[in-house]
Image (spheres, rainbow, N blue to C red):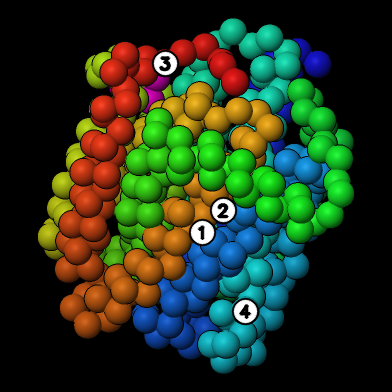
Amino acid sequence: MTAERVLRTYLTLVVVSTGASSMIWGINTVFLLDAGLSVGKTFAANAFFTAGMVLFEVPTGVVADTVGRRTSYLLGTATLIGTTLAYLLLWRVHAPFVWWAVVSALLGLGFTFFSGATEAWLVDGLHATGYSGSLDAAFAKGQVANGVAMMVGSIGGGVLAQVTNLGVPYAVRALLLTATFVVAWRAMHDIGFAPKPRVSVRGELTSIVRASLRHGLQNPRVRWVMLAGPFTAGVGVYGFYAAQPYLLALYGHTHSYAIAGLSAGVVAAAQITGGTTAPHLTRLFRDRIRTLVAAVVVSGVVIAGLGLVTHFWAALLLLMVWGSMFAAMGPVRQAYLNSHIPSGQRATVLSFDNLLGSAGGVVLQPALGRTADVWGYGPAYVVSAVVQLLAVPVLARSKPVETTGDQPLALRA
Protein backbone atom coordinates (compact mmCIF):
# COMPACT_ATOMS: atom_id res chain seq x y z
CA MET A 1 0.00 0.00 0.00
CA THR A 2 1.31 3.46 -0.90
CA ALA A 3 1.27 6.56 1.29
CA GLU A 4 -1.31 8.11 -1.04
CA ARG A 5 -3.62 5.14 -0.57
CA VAL A 6 -3.19 5.25 3.22
CA LEU A 7 -4.15 8.91 3.24
CA ARG A 8 -7.05 8.30 0.86
CA THR A 9 -8.38 5.48 3.07
CA TYR A 10 -8.10 7.73 6.12
CA LEU A 11 -10.06 10.48 4.40
CA THR A 12 -12.72 7.98 3.30
CA LEU A 13 -13.14 6.74 6.86
CA VAL A 14 -13.40 10.31 8.12
CA VAL A 15 -16.11 11.13 5.58
CA VAL A 16 -18.28 8.05 6.12
CA SER A 17 -18.03 8.02 9.93
CA THR A 18 -18.51 11.77 10.38
CA GLY A 19 -21.31 11.91 7.81
CA ALA A 20 -23.16 9.19 9.70
CA SER A 21 -22.47 10.49 13.21
CA SER A 22 -23.29 14.12 12.41
CA MET A 23 -26.87 13.35 11.40
CA ILE A 24 -27.85 14.16 14.99
CA TRP A 25 -25.25 16.73 15.97
CA GLY A 26 -27.32 19.72 14.89
CA ILE A 27 -30.41 18.63 16.82
CA ASN A 28 -29.11 16.60 19.76
CA THR A 29 -29.64 19.31 22.39
CA VAL A 30 -33.15 20.02 21.09
CA PHE A 31 -33.77 16.25 21.00
CA LEU A 32 -32.90 15.90 24.70
CA LEU A 33 -35.05 18.89 25.62
CA ASP A 34 -37.93 17.40 23.62
CA ALA A 35 -37.51 14.16 25.60
CA GLY A 36 -38.44 16.08 28.75
CA LEU A 37 -35.02 16.97 30.16
CA SER A 38 -34.32 20.44 31.56
CA VAL A 39 -31.42 22.55 30.27
CA GLY A 40 -29.34 21.52 33.26
CA LYS A 41 -30.14 17.81 32.84
CA THR A 42 -29.52 18.04 29.11
CA PHE A 43 -25.95 19.19 29.62
CA ALA A 44 -25.59 16.77 32.53
CA ALA A 45 -26.45 13.97 30.07
CA ASN A 46 -23.76 15.35 27.77
CA ALA A 47 -21.43 15.37 30.78
CA PHE A 48 -22.08 11.65 31.29
CA PHE A 49 -21.13 11.18 27.64
CA THR A 50 -17.79 12.86 28.29
CA ALA A 51 -17.48 10.99 31.60
CA GLY A 52 -17.76 7.78 29.59
CA MET A 53 -14.93 9.03 27.42
CA VAL A 54 -12.83 9.73 30.52
CA LEU A 55 -13.56 6.28 31.94
CA PHE A 56 -12.84 4.35 28.74
CA GLU A 57 -10.17 6.40 26.96
CA VAL A 58 -7.13 4.54 28.28
CA PRO A 59 -8.64 1.01 28.16
CA THR A 60 -9.72 1.47 24.55
CA GLY A 61 -6.32 2.97 23.77
CA VAL A 62 -4.85 -0.25 25.16
CA VAL A 63 -7.07 -2.21 22.75
CA ALA A 64 -5.71 -0.16 19.85
CA ASP A 65 -2.08 -0.62 20.93
CA THR A 66 -2.29 -4.35 21.72
CA VAL A 67 -4.99 -5.79 19.47
CA GLY A 68 -4.97 -3.31 16.59
CA ARG A 69 -6.21 0.05 15.35
CA ARG A 70 -8.66 -1.60 12.93
CA THR A 71 -10.25 -3.72 15.66
CA SER A 72 -10.67 -0.66 17.85
CA TYR A 73 -12.35 1.25 15.03
CA LEU A 74 -14.79 -1.58 14.28
CA LEU A 75 -15.70 -1.95 17.96
CA GLY A 76 -16.39 1.78 18.13
CA THR A 77 -18.69 1.70 15.13
CA ALA A 78 -20.67 -1.25 16.50
CA THR A 79 -21.05 0.46 19.89
CA LEU A 80 -22.33 3.67 18.28
CA ILE A 81 -24.95 1.74 16.32
CA GLY A 82 -26.34 0.19 19.51
CA THR A 83 -26.29 3.37 21.60
CA THR A 84 -27.89 5.44 18.83
CA LEU A 85 -30.84 3.03 18.71
CA ALA A 86 -31.00 3.12 22.52
CA TYR A 87 -31.19 6.94 22.42
CA LEU A 88 -34.11 6.68 20.02
CA LEU A 89 -35.93 4.32 22.38
CA LEU A 90 -35.36 6.57 25.41
CA TRP A 91 -36.79 9.53 23.49
CA ARG A 92 -39.91 7.63 22.50
CA VAL A 93 -40.71 6.56 26.07
CA HIS A 94 -39.54 9.81 27.76
CA ALA A 95 -37.23 7.78 29.97
CA PRO A 96 -36.02 9.09 33.34
CA PHE A 97 -32.65 10.85 33.50
CA VAL A 98 -30.77 7.88 34.94
CA TRP A 99 -31.18 5.95 31.68
CA TRP A 100 -29.98 8.90 29.65
CA ALA A 101 -26.91 9.02 31.87
CA VAL A 102 -26.15 5.31 31.36
CA VAL A 103 -26.62 5.30 27.58
CA SER A 104 -24.72 8.59 27.22
CA ALA A 105 -21.75 7.06 29.02
CA LEU A 106 -21.87 4.04 26.68
CA LEU A 107 -22.06 6.43 23.74
CA GLY A 108 -18.82 7.92 25.03
CA LEU A 109 -17.34 4.41 25.03
CA GLY A 110 -18.05 4.15 21.31
CA PHE A 111 -16.16 7.32 20.50
CA THR A 112 -13.17 6.37 22.66
CA PHE A 113 -12.60 3.36 20.41
CA PHE A 114 -12.13 5.92 17.60
CA SER A 115 -10.02 8.50 19.42
CA GLY A 116 -6.31 7.90 19.19
CA ALA A 117 -6.71 4.73 17.12
CA THR A 118 -7.64 6.48 13.87
CA GLU A 119 -4.84 9.05 14.13
CA ALA A 120 -2.34 6.38 15.16
CA TRP A 121 -3.41 4.21 12.20
CA LEU A 122 -2.78 7.11 9.81
CA VAL A 123 0.60 8.11 11.25
CA ASP A 124 1.86 4.51 11.41
CA GLY A 125 0.71 3.85 7.86
CA LEU A 126 2.29 7.02 6.47
CA HIS A 127 5.55 6.29 8.26
CA ALA A 128 5.66 2.70 6.96
CA THR A 129 5.02 3.77 3.37
CA GLY A 130 7.66 6.50 3.25
CA TYR A 131 5.43 9.56 3.37
CA SER A 132 7.51 12.72 2.84
CA GLY A 133 4.89 15.39 3.44
CA SER A 134 4.06 17.21 6.68
CA LEU A 135 1.68 15.94 9.32
CA ASP A 136 0.06 19.38 9.42
CA ALA A 137 -1.04 19.01 5.80
CA ALA A 138 -2.26 15.43 6.29
CA PHE A 139 -4.34 16.29 9.33
CA ALA A 140 -5.59 19.48 7.64
CA LYS A 141 -6.97 17.36 4.79
CA GLY A 142 -8.72 15.24 7.38
CA GLN A 143 -10.12 18.40 8.98
CA VAL A 144 -11.52 19.56 5.64
CA ALA A 145 -13.02 16.13 4.89
CA ASN A 146 -14.50 16.05 8.39
CA GLY A 147 -16.00 19.52 7.87
CA VAL A 148 -17.60 18.64 4.54
CA ALA A 149 -19.11 15.43 5.92
CA MET A 150 -20.30 17.19 9.07
CA MET A 151 -21.89 20.02 7.10
CA VAL A 152 -23.83 17.64 4.88
CA GLY A 153 -24.80 15.34 7.75
CA SER A 154 -25.83 17.96 10.30
CA ILE A 155 -27.80 20.14 7.88
CA GLY A 156 -29.37 17.03 6.37
CA GLY A 157 -30.32 15.77 9.83
CA GLY A 158 -31.89 19.11 10.74
CA VAL A 159 -33.92 19.26 7.53
CA LEU A 160 -34.96 15.63 7.94
CA ALA A 161 -36.17 16.35 11.49
CA GLN A 162 -38.07 19.39 10.19
CA VAL A 163 -40.04 17.43 7.59
CA THR A 164 -40.53 14.31 9.77
CA ASN A 165 -39.72 14.33 13.49
CA LEU A 166 -36.70 14.46 15.80
CA GLY A 167 -36.38 10.67 15.95
CA VAL A 168 -35.90 9.93 12.24
CA PRO A 169 -32.32 11.30 12.00
CA TYR A 170 -31.32 8.87 14.76
CA ALA A 171 -32.70 5.92 12.82
CA VAL A 172 -30.91 7.10 9.66
CA ARG A 173 -27.72 7.55 11.65
CA ALA A 174 -27.82 3.91 12.78
CA LEU A 175 -28.22 2.76 9.16
CA LEU A 176 -25.32 4.93 7.95
CA LEU A 177 -23.10 3.71 10.79
CA THR A 178 -23.80 0.17 9.62
CA ALA A 179 -22.50 1.19 6.20
CA THR A 180 -19.46 2.73 7.92
CA PHE A 181 -18.72 -0.60 9.58
CA VAL A 182 -18.73 -2.33 6.21
CA VAL A 183 -16.38 0.26 4.67
CA ALA A 184 -13.91 0.00 7.59
CA TRP A 185 -14.01 -3.81 7.50
CA ARG A 186 -13.01 -3.84 3.84
CA ALA A 187 -10.62 -0.90 3.56
CA MET A 188 -8.89 -0.49 6.93
CA HIS A 189 -5.88 -2.74 7.62
CA ASP A 190 -3.11 -2.14 10.14
CA ILE A 191 0.09 -1.05 8.36
CA GLY A 192 3.39 -0.29 10.04
CA PHE A 193 2.11 -1.67 13.33
CA ALA A 194 2.45 -5.14 14.85
CA PRO A 195 0.09 -5.96 17.75
CA LYS A 196 2.04 -6.59 20.94
CA PRO A 197 2.02 -10.08 22.46
CA ARG A 198 -0.41 -10.30 25.36
CA VAL A 199 0.40 -11.90 28.68
CA SER A 200 -2.32 -10.57 30.97
CA VAL A 201 -4.82 -7.74 30.66
CA ARG A 202 -3.67 -6.22 33.95
CA GLY A 203 -0.01 -6.44 32.97
CA GLU A 204 -0.63 -4.90 29.57
CA LEU A 205 -2.71 -2.12 31.06
CA THR A 206 -0.07 -1.31 33.67
CA SER A 207 2.87 -1.30 31.26
CA ILE A 208 1.12 0.73 28.57
CA VAL A 209 -0.28 3.27 31.02
CA ARG A 210 3.22 3.74 32.46
CA ALA A 211 4.63 4.16 28.97
CA SER A 212 1.90 6.63 28.02
CA LEU A 213 2.57 8.68 31.13
CA ARG A 214 6.31 8.66 30.40
CA HIS A 215 5.78 9.86 26.85
CA GLY A 216 2.81 12.05 27.79
CA LEU A 217 2.61 14.04 31.02
CA GLN A 218 6.23 13.30 31.90
CA ASN A 219 7.38 14.53 28.50
CA PRO A 220 7.99 18.29 28.89
CA ARG A 221 7.39 18.85 25.17
CA VAL A 222 3.77 17.65 25.29
CA ARG A 223 2.81 17.97 28.97
CA TRP A 224 1.49 21.53 28.90
CA VAL A 225 -0.29 21.11 25.57
CA MET A 226 -2.15 18.14 27.05
CA LEU A 227 -2.97 19.99 30.29
CA ALA A 228 -4.43 22.91 28.32
CA GLY A 229 -6.83 20.49 26.64
CA PRO A 230 -9.51 20.42 29.38
CA PHE A 231 -10.09 24.18 29.04
CA THR A 232 -10.40 24.31 25.25
CA ALA A 233 -12.13 20.95 24.76
CA GLY A 234 -14.60 21.51 27.59
CA VAL A 235 -15.61 24.92 26.29
CA GLY A 236 -15.68 23.63 22.72
CA VAL A 237 -18.22 20.87 23.34
CA TYR A 238 -20.47 23.16 25.40
CA GLY A 239 -20.23 25.98 22.85
CA PHE A 240 -21.22 23.67 20.02
CA TYR A 241 -24.25 22.08 21.66
CA ALA A 242 -25.48 25.26 23.35
CA ALA A 243 -25.54 27.00 19.96
CA GLN A 244 -28.58 24.96 18.90
CA PRO A 245 -31.14 26.28 21.44
CA TYR A 246 -29.38 29.67 21.63
CA LEU A 247 -29.71 30.34 17.91
CA LEU A 248 -33.28 29.05 17.90
CA ALA A 249 -34.12 31.53 20.66
CA LEU A 250 -32.50 34.40 18.74
CA TYR A 251 -34.28 33.28 15.56
CA GLY A 252 -37.65 33.36 17.34
CA HIS A 253 -38.89 29.90 16.30
CA THR A 254 -37.93 27.20 18.79
CA HIS A 255 -39.24 24.37 16.58
CA SER A 256 -37.31 25.29 13.44
CA TYR A 257 -35.08 22.22 13.52
CA ALA A 258 -33.54 23.10 10.17
CA ILE A 259 -32.05 26.20 11.85
CA ALA A 260 -30.62 23.98 14.59
CA GLY A 261 -29.04 21.82 11.91
CA LEU A 262 -27.74 24.96 10.23
CA SER A 263 -25.85 25.89 13.40
CA ALA A 264 -23.89 22.64 13.19
CA GLY A 265 -23.50 23.13 9.44
CA VAL A 266 -21.96 26.54 10.02
CA VAL A 267 -19.44 25.03 12.41
CA ALA A 268 -18.70 22.35 9.79
CA ALA A 269 -18.11 25.00 7.12
CA ALA A 270 -15.82 26.74 9.57
CA GLN A 271 -13.92 23.48 10.01
CA ILE A 272 -13.32 23.38 6.28
CA THR A 273 -11.97 26.93 6.39
CA GLY A 274 -9.88 26.21 9.47
CA GLY A 275 -8.49 23.02 7.97
CA THR A 276 -7.39 24.73 4.78
CA THR A 277 -5.76 27.62 6.65
CA ALA A 278 -3.99 25.56 9.33
CA PRO A 279 -0.80 24.92 7.28
CA HIS A 280 -0.60 28.63 6.45
CA LEU A 281 -1.08 29.72 10.08
CA THR A 282 2.13 28.04 11.12
CA ARG A 283 4.05 30.25 8.69
CA LEU A 284 2.96 33.34 10.63
CA PHE A 285 4.54 32.12 13.84
CA ARG A 286 7.90 30.63 14.73
CA ASP A 287 6.46 27.48 16.28
CA ARG A 288 3.23 25.57 16.77
CA ILE A 289 2.87 26.63 20.41
CA ARG A 290 2.58 30.28 19.39
CA THR A 291 0.00 29.29 16.80
CA LEU A 292 -2.08 27.52 19.45
CA VAL A 293 -1.85 30.42 21.89
CA ALA A 294 -2.96 32.91 19.25
CA ALA A 295 -5.90 30.71 18.21
CA VAL A 296 -7.03 30.26 21.84
CA VAL A 297 -6.96 34.02 22.47
CA VAL A 298 -8.80 35.00 19.30
CA SER A 299 -11.44 32.29 19.64
CA GLY A 300 -11.96 33.23 23.30
CA VAL A 301 -12.71 36.82 22.32
CA VAL A 302 -15.13 35.59 19.66
CA ILE A 303 -16.95 33.33 22.17
CA ALA A 304 -17.45 36.33 24.45
CA GLY A 305 -18.85 38.30 21.52
CA LEU A 306 -21.20 35.43 20.72
CA GLY A 307 -22.68 35.73 24.18
CA LEU A 308 -23.12 39.50 23.94
CA VAL A 309 -24.89 39.86 20.59
CA THR A 310 -28.68 39.90 20.36
CA HIS A 311 -29.23 39.33 16.64
CA PHE A 312 -29.46 35.92 14.99
CA TRP A 313 -27.31 36.65 11.94
CA ALA A 314 -24.57 38.30 14.00
CA ALA A 315 -24.48 35.27 16.29
CA LEU A 316 -24.36 32.93 13.30
CA LEU A 317 -21.40 34.85 11.85
CA LEU A 318 -19.51 34.78 15.15
CA LEU A 319 -20.23 31.07 15.47
CA MET A 320 -18.55 30.52 12.10
CA VAL A 321 -15.50 32.59 13.10
CA TRP A 322 -15.20 30.69 16.37
CA GLY A 323 -15.51 27.37 14.56
CA SER A 324 -12.79 28.40 12.09
CA MET A 325 -10.33 29.24 14.85
CA PHE A 326 -11.16 26.08 16.77
CA ALA A 327 -10.74 24.00 13.62
CA ALA A 328 -7.43 25.65 12.77
CA MET A 329 -6.07 24.60 16.16
CA GLY A 330 -6.88 20.93 15.52
CA PRO A 331 -4.35 19.95 12.82
CA VAL A 332 -1.59 22.05 14.42
CA ARG A 333 -2.15 20.44 17.80
CA GLN A 334 -2.39 16.94 16.32
CA ALA A 335 0.83 17.37 14.38
CA TYR A 336 2.66 18.76 17.41
CA LEU A 337 1.67 15.87 19.69
CA ASN A 338 2.31 13.16 17.09
CA SER A 339 5.77 14.61 16.42
CA HIS A 340 6.79 13.90 20.02
CA ILE A 341 5.14 10.51 20.69
CA PRO A 342 6.78 7.19 19.70
CA SER A 343 4.74 4.77 17.58
CA GLY A 344 4.40 2.01 20.16
CA GLN A 345 2.54 4.23 22.62
CA ARG A 346 0.94 6.62 20.14
CA ALA A 347 -2.67 5.43 20.37
CA THR A 348 -2.63 5.22 24.16
CA VAL A 349 -1.00 8.63 24.67
CA LEU A 350 -3.42 10.24 22.23
CA SER A 351 -6.30 8.53 24.03
CA PHE A 352 -4.95 9.87 27.33
CA ASP A 353 -4.86 13.34 25.78
CA ASN A 354 -8.50 12.91 24.76
CA LEU A 355 -9.23 11.71 28.30
CA LEU A 356 -7.97 15.01 29.70
CA GLY A 357 -10.09 16.95 27.23
CA SER A 358 -13.13 14.88 28.13
CA ALA A 359 -12.49 15.47 31.83
CA GLY A 360 -12.82 19.18 31.12
CA GLY A 361 -16.17 18.51 29.50
CA VAL A 362 -17.37 16.49 32.51
CA VAL A 363 -16.82 19.47 34.78
CA LEU A 364 -17.63 22.35 32.46
CA GLN A 365 -20.77 21.12 30.68
CA PRO A 366 -23.02 20.82 33.76
CA ALA A 367 -21.49 23.98 35.25
CA LEU A 368 -22.07 26.02 32.11
CA GLY A 369 -25.46 24.37 31.57
CA ARG A 370 -26.47 25.46 35.05
CA THR A 371 -25.18 28.95 34.28
CA ALA A 372 -27.44 29.00 31.20
CA ASP A 373 -30.35 27.76 33.32
CA VAL A 374 -29.94 30.64 35.78
CA TRP A 375 -28.67 33.53 33.64
CA GLY A 376 -29.27 32.47 30.04
CA TYR A 377 -27.13 31.19 27.17
CA GLY A 378 -25.52 34.57 26.45
CA PRO A 379 -23.92 35.02 29.89
CA ALA A 380 -22.90 31.35 29.82
CA TYR A 381 -20.93 32.00 26.62
CA VAL A 382 -19.14 34.93 28.29
CA VAL A 383 -18.20 32.67 31.20
CA SER A 384 -17.01 30.08 28.64
CA ALA A 385 -14.66 32.63 27.11
CA VAL A 386 -13.06 33.34 30.49
CA VAL A 387 -12.58 29.62 31.11
CA GLN A 388 -10.98 29.04 27.71
CA LEU A 389 -8.49 31.87 28.20
CA LEU A 390 -7.18 30.00 31.25
CA ALA A 391 -5.49 27.69 28.72
CA VAL A 392 -3.13 30.48 27.63
CA PRO A 393 -0.81 30.51 30.68
CA VAL A 394 -0.79 26.69 30.62
CA LEU A 395 0.29 26.59 26.97
CA ALA A 396 2.85 29.30 27.65
CA ARG A 397 4.67 26.88 29.97
CA SER A 398 5.70 24.96 26.84
CA LYS A 399 7.83 27.86 25.61
CA PRO A 400 11.00 27.08 27.61
CA VAL A 401 11.33 23.61 26.05
CA GLU A 402 10.79 24.92 22.52
CA THR A 403 14.13 26.71 22.32
CA THR A 404 14.76 25.75 18.71
CA GLY A 405 11.24 26.31 17.47
CA ASP A 406 8.89 23.73 16.05
CA GLN A 407 8.29 24.49 12.42
CA PRO A 408 6.02 22.12 10.48
CA LEU A 409 8.17 19.09 9.78
CA ALA A 410 7.98 16.07 7.58
CA LEU A 411 6.71 12.94 9.29
CA ARG A 412 8.83 11.73 12.14
CA ALA A 413 8.14 9.02 14.71
Between circles 2 and 3, the one closer to the viewer is: 3
Residue at left offset 32%, top offset 22%: 402
Mark 4 or mark 2: name the one nearer the start of the chain: 2
Which residue in the protein does label 3 denote? Answer: 408
Decide: marks 1, 2 in contact (CB < 8 A)? Answer: yes
In whole angstroms, how far apart are the C-alphas of marks 1 and 2? Answer: 5 Å
Give the crowd class for mark 2: few <14, some 14-19, many >=20 residues within 10 Å.
many
Q: Quadrant of residue 406?
A: top left
In whole angstroms, how far apart are the C-alphas of marks 4 and 3? Answer: 42 Å
Q: Secondary structure at mark 3?
A: loop
Res 25 label: 1
Give the crowd class for mark 1: few <14, some 14-19, many >=20 residues within 10 Å.
many
The reply to whether residue 361 is in sight is: yes
Of the 4 image quadrants, the one containing the C terminus is top right
Decide: marks 2, 3 in contact (CB < 8 A)? Answer: no
Query: Which stretch did the figure color magenta?
Result: 278-282
In whole angstroms, how far apart are the C-alphas of marks 4 and 2? Answer: 21 Å
Vertical arrangement, residue 303 with respect to residue 87, above or below? above
Percent of width and height locating residue 342: 60, 28
